[in-house]
Amino acid sequence: MGEQNVWAVFLGGKIRKGALVEDHELVFVVALDEIAARKQAKLKWAAEEVHVDGTQCLRVIDGYQIRLEESLSGGDDIPVDNRYTA
């Protein structure tokens, strides 16, 4: 089994019915690989026609190494904002 990493996933999609242009959302997920990260990220945004515009595996930021430690609470601390979903 591989190593879990933090992934930044840039999503595109329509959050307003009948919108002419798409909106974007940056979400973070923990996944084994890019394919899994893309699938998980799409589940975090309730928009229409959701697609992935880009991904980045985050291991080091500004000289600081990222290490994952499982949370005792088990869930996300930051809820996804879906107030614009029609």
Image (spheres, grey):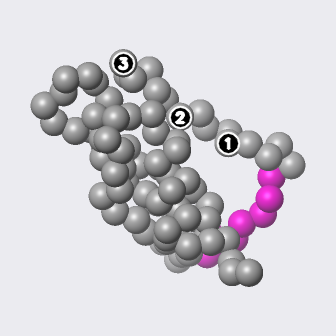
What's the residue at 39%, 23% (across, down)?
Answer: 85
Magenta range is: 64-71
Which amino acid lies under the numbered mark 3 shown in the image of this protein?
Ala
The earlier-in-sequence mark between 3 and 2 is 2
Secondary structure of the residue carrying numbered label 1? loop
Residue assigned mark 1: 76
Q: What residue type is labelled 1?
A: Asp
Mark 3 or mark 1, which is nearer the start of the sequence? 1
Please state, as top left, top right, bottom left or bottom right, where the N terminus lies in the image. Answer: bottom right
Badge 3 element: loop
Residue located farthest toward the right when viewing the structure as drawn: 72
Residue 49, located in which quarter of the rendered image?
top left
Give the residue type that dot 2 points to: Val
Residue topped by disc 3: 86
Q: Percent position (x, y) of residue 7? A: 52, 64
Say left or right for 19 vs 80: left
Query: What's the residue at 46%, 48% (across, down)?
Result: 42
